[in-house]
Structures are given as structure tokens and as C-alpha cells.
Image: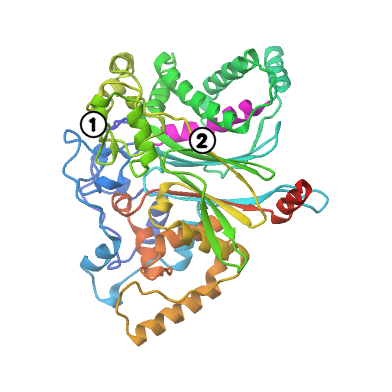
Amino acid sequence: MCVCPGPRRIAIPVRSSRLPLLSDAMPAPAHLFPLIRNCEISRIGSTACYCHHRHLCCLPSHFAHSHFRYAPQKKFAALYRPKENFNHFIHTRDHASASQRFYLTPPQVNSILKANEYSFKVPEFDGKNVSSVLGFDSNQLPANAPIEDRRSAATCLQTRGMLLGVFDGHAGCACAQAVSERLFYYIAVSLLPHETLLEIENAVESGRALLPILQWHKHPNDYFSKEASKLYFNSLRTYWQELIDLNSGETTDVREALINAFKRLDNDISLEAQVGDPNSFLNYLVLRVAFSGATACVAHVDGVDLHIANTGDSRAMLGVQEEDGSWSAVNLSYDHNAQNEHEVERVKTEHPKSEEKTLVKQDRLLGLLMPFRAFGDVKFKWSIELQKRVIESGPDQLNDNEYTKFIPPNYHTPPYLTAEPEVIYHKLRPQDKFLVLATDGLWETMHRQDVARIVGEYLTGVHHQQPIAVGGYKVTLGQMHGLLTERRARISSVFEDQNAATHLIRHAVGNNEFGTVDHERLSKMLSLPEELARMYRDDITIIVVQFNSHVIGACQNEEL
């Protein structure tokens, strides 16, 4: 029986036959490709439980310790071994003869890669685009089932600007889903002038139609929780009522608005879980949201003003075109984890010196959590007494769950975790061509400079040839000829993707040791069932925002 904090803990019959792993030594049955795309293979194979989301208790013991947001505890998981190398996986498995190998065909690969892609182009007025944003491409590739990442994009209708964000969930997708639905409303409300807030409140009081605040740009799979919409609206209304009461008459600062919105939403997530709901479904939903967690990386673009608000370890990167046509990457966010010395120091200063040795262990917060900032994760924020009270008074699914009842070790002076974002401002220049927002699934596989080059060449259609690097490998003349031939073929087909995020995912998953997309590798990676896929990569979510250099240049000239 599974003990994960998902909405379902239902034992199901285990089929006697076991589905073999799809590999290069066997054909991939045609009827399985929809299941591959939806990460459903394990549900028709042998499994002991059905969970709405994957968690440590559901994972085989050979999964990588380093790949998880939560480190496994001895009471919950078996021994873990280091992350597998995919090249080792390819070359050490038993293979049939070359004539018996079967791979996904290019159309099948494209079908998987493009299943979640979305594009938006900013409309023109009188044949001219007056926005600093031309449009954006986004895409997602799952590794977890269901995917724990989320994405959002919207245009602010009552103020100026566009909001875009990626959200990386852990311990399930519930918190990431809630944050992806709600955060932009909190930001938009924080940016509204006092008069508009009064107008919205008066409309609610009198039962009139509300002014639309956001225009969403969503893929059909990017759903909203209809059951929780009333609860979410009531919390948001309470927030704007408080903003009305606290009116200072001053113009709202974007940086302050972003910080306030992040912190207030996280506070509401916590409060909703403490208060509960008479509706049993909603009561369990708010608890799942609070006990799971999510990081967030959000961009607000208004003319030449770009603000990045980041909580956790997703990243924002600016693609800059140099005078010689080459591409460089500029970081617009910093990871909030153990690799960030300033972040480690911040955590230590917030707790007694007696806890200094236990705060960060094995590069994790309290030895458990990889990101040092996140939404939800009340196990790292609430007092022990509050956790016990909420769990004991909660539904049986929560009270019977070993994970939710588990208290982190050395838990003395909570909260240990915050959702407060680090906000970075950048004034856009004509050479700033695009922005990449992505969850850590991308950055674990690609260096930011490679990301800048690949996206830049894709958007401009200009492919700058670099000397082929073999990275210390000994290659024969014939192998070098093969690499050059492959590169020439790749250039001719590089623009088969109509979406920059899809193109980037293709490289992230399919690049070989020489930095080129290897169809065989890509096919194998996309054929892995969910039990294996999470061993070699994380969920990947990407938004690529393309800027309008002409508008940005004109704004720059007006200021001179």
C-alpha cells in the first residue's frame, strides 16, 4: 500500500504479465505510443499502487538520491545509488543484433515532443507591433506521471505588461498547480491603482460583472481547478480589500508588488490548510497543496522594464546577440540552494548558532529539501504542534499517511523555508533578443551558453559553425567524416520545429557527447517508461520570450 500524500491510496490488482521495457532490442508496439506520451506505461504494467502523483514511497530503490527534491529517509526508502549515466545505460544493456533494433520514427518523436507546445504572437495594431514582446513559445516534456511542472502566461489588462512563469512542483503537483492558477492574479491585484481596486470591490458588492484583470494564454492541457475557484476568489478578494484599507496613495512599485504577491499567496495557502473546508474534497485539496511544494520563476515585462521574481531553483536567462552575431547568456536569477553561498548564509542567520551544523546537510535544507525557497512545504514552516493538530483533525487519507506525519530531523525553530522571491531588474536593450524561463530539468542537461546559442540560431535562422569538439575522445577519420555529414544534415533540418521551446527540448534530451542531436538517443529517451525516465532526467518546462528590438530601440532613443 502506498503511503504518499496523493489524493488516492487505492490498492489495485497487479496483472500477472509484466510489460518489458521498451528498448533498442524490441519493437515498440504502435498502441503504446499514446501511453508513452502520457507517461502511462506503468499503469498497464505491474505495479502495487495507483497514485495521483509520484513520490518517494512509490519509486524503485535504484532511483538517484541526487535527483529528488526530497531526500529519502531510511524509514521511507531503500538504499539509493548515484544517478545513472544514460550512455552507460545504452551501452551496457543486453542488445539483440542490429537488424532487430527498433526505434521511434522521426514522426513519432515529433508527436511526443510537440504534444504540449504552445505559441502566442502579440497582435499588431495598424500593421505595427507596439509591444516590446513579439510573442513566446512554450513546451513541457514529462518525466514524472503526472508531470509536476506547470507554466503560465497572461497579459495584464488593467495595468501594462505581460506575466510569464514556470513552476516546478515537488512531493506531487498540487502546489505547482495552485500557484500556476493563482499567483498572477495576486501580482495583477498588487499592481492595480487604488481607484481600480475600489471599482472591482464595488462591482462584487453590487453583483455587477467584474473588470477582467488578466487575459490568459494557455495550452488546452493547462487547466484550472473549477472546484476551488470560489475558495481562491474569496482569498484573493480578502487580499484586495486589505490593499484598499492600506492605501497609501503612492504608485505601486513593481518589485514590491511581486514580493508582496508571492508572500501573500503562500500565506493564504497555509491559512486555507489550517482553517479547512466543510467540503471534504476541498478540504483534502487545500491540505495536499500545503503539504506539497513548488518553486516559481516569473517574468514581468512592461516596455523596456523587465523584472524577474524567483523563488527556488528554476532559472531566467537572457539571450544577447553580440556585434559579431554570436550569442551570449546573461543570468537573471540565482538558484536558492546549497550551491548559493549567499543563500546558505541567509538561512544560517535566521536560526540560532546551535543549529548551524544541522541546517544544511548533504546540500539539503535539514538534510531533506533541495530548494531553500518554495511555496507550500508547510512541513518546513509550521510548528510541530500545528502540524500535528492539522493532521489529526484532517481527513483519514492525511492522518494515515506516514509521510505527512513525519517531522523533519533537528526541527527546532521553524519556519526554515520562505516563498519570498529574489527580484532582479533589467532594462532591455536592442541586443537583448530573447528570454528563457525554464525549470531545472533543462539546466541539469544544458549549459546556459549552449541554450543561448541554440535558441539564438533558431530564431535568427543563422547557424554559426563552430569547430567540432570531440571532448578528448579518440575519433577516426571516418568518424569525423560522419560527424561532419551529420552536422550538414542537421543544418538542413534544424528548422523542422515551429516552436523554439520544442527545439530546445529536442537538444536537451537528444544531444550526444559531441553536442549534436542523436536521433537514436532521442528515441530511446522518449521510449523510457516512467519508472526509468525519472532516473535520467526531470520534467522539463520552457518558455522562450522573443523581444521586439525595434520597439526597444525606439524607447531607448526617446530617453536620450
Residue hosting label 2: 180
| Residue density around tag 1, few if under 14, some if 14–19, many if 20 or more, within 10 Å | some
Q: Is residue 200 above or below residue 366?
A: above
Q: Position of residue 266 (x, y in %)?
A: 46, 26
The Cα–Cα distance between marks 2 and 1, rounded to whole angstroms, is 32 Å
Q: As shown in the figure, which amino acid type bears the numbered disc 1?
A: Thr
Q: Quadrant of residue 11?
A: top left
Q: Position of residue 21 (x, y in %)?
A: 27, 58
At x 32%, y 81%, the residue is: 475
Q: Is residue 85 visible?
A: yes
Residue hosting label 1: 358
Say left or right for 453 vs 205. Answer: left
Q: As shown in the figure, which amino acid type bears the numbered disc 2?
A: Ser
Say left or right for 119 vs 172. Answer: right
Q: Position of residue 369 (x, y in %)?
A: 31, 36
Start and end of the magenta stretch?
Answer: 172-192
Task: Characterize the magenta stretch by its predominant secondary structure.
Answer: helix
Q: Is residue 375 above or below residue 507?
A: above
**For this rendering, which residue is in front, 222 or 84?**
84
